[in-house]
Amino acid sequence: MLTLNKKKILEYQQNREPYLMIDEATSVEPGKSANGFKDLKKDEWFFKVHWKDDPNMPGMLQIEALVQMCALGILTLDGNKGKVVYLVGADNLKFYKKILPEVRLNIYTKILSFKRGIAKCYGEGIINEQLACKASFTLVLTDKMIKM
């Protein structure tokens, strides 16, 4: 089991501020799961534009947070550090509550399968012990795919 602070996260994956949607990975089991959080400050760039009088985290950035966390479960496997993981599909996206400034988005993800560079994944975002969002998604590590 690994724990990654922001500095270590930046060693493993390519997203950078302001698009980095995770602050810490509290537990990563390479090839299986990654969990952690994003502390949402009131000055986050997206709160300023989504929406002026009702700031909340856009749904697709919620999914991006799940994807970035789950990607750590792939990138921590031997030989994958620093590589690029692409989101190629998402299903069953559900948004249950607004994610507002000054809260912690707890992120829980699982890699359901990982074969030939293709990962089937699932993630949930939790705010104040309540489900805020969830999704199933597919990630691709392109250099592991078998060329057709």
Image (cartoon, rainbow, N blue to C red):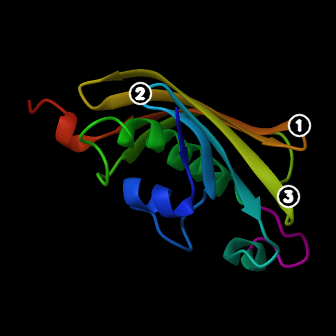
Quadrant of res 122: top right
Quadrant of residue 92 in the image?
top right
Q: Earlier in the sequence, mark 3 or mark 1?
A: 3
Residue at image point 34% right, 35% down: 77
Horizontal relation, residue 71 to residue 53: left or right? left
Residue drawn where x is 29% and y is 51% of the image: 83
Point out the stretch of residues depicted in magenta: 50-57
Q: Which residue is mark 3?
A: 103
The answer to whether residue 110 is magenta is: no
The front one of 41 and 56 is 41
- Using the rendered view, name the quadrant where residue 14 is placed: bottom left
- Total numbered labels: 3
Q: Is residue 139 left or right of residue 125?
A: left
Q: What's the distance in space between the residues labelled 3 and 2, CA to CA?
A: 29 Å
Q: Quadrant of the C terminus?
A: top left
Q: Residue tagged by mark 1?
A: 129
Q: Looking at the image, which residue sits at the far left?
A: 148
**Residue 50 placement (x, y as % from top left):** 76, 71
Q: Earlier in the sequence, mark 3 or mark 2?
A: 2
Q: Amino acid at mark 2?
A: Gly
- Labels 3 and 2 touching (C-beta < 8 A): no
User: Which secondary structure, mark 3?
Assistant: strand
Kind of residue sitting beneath label 1: Glu
* Residue that mark 2 sits on: 31
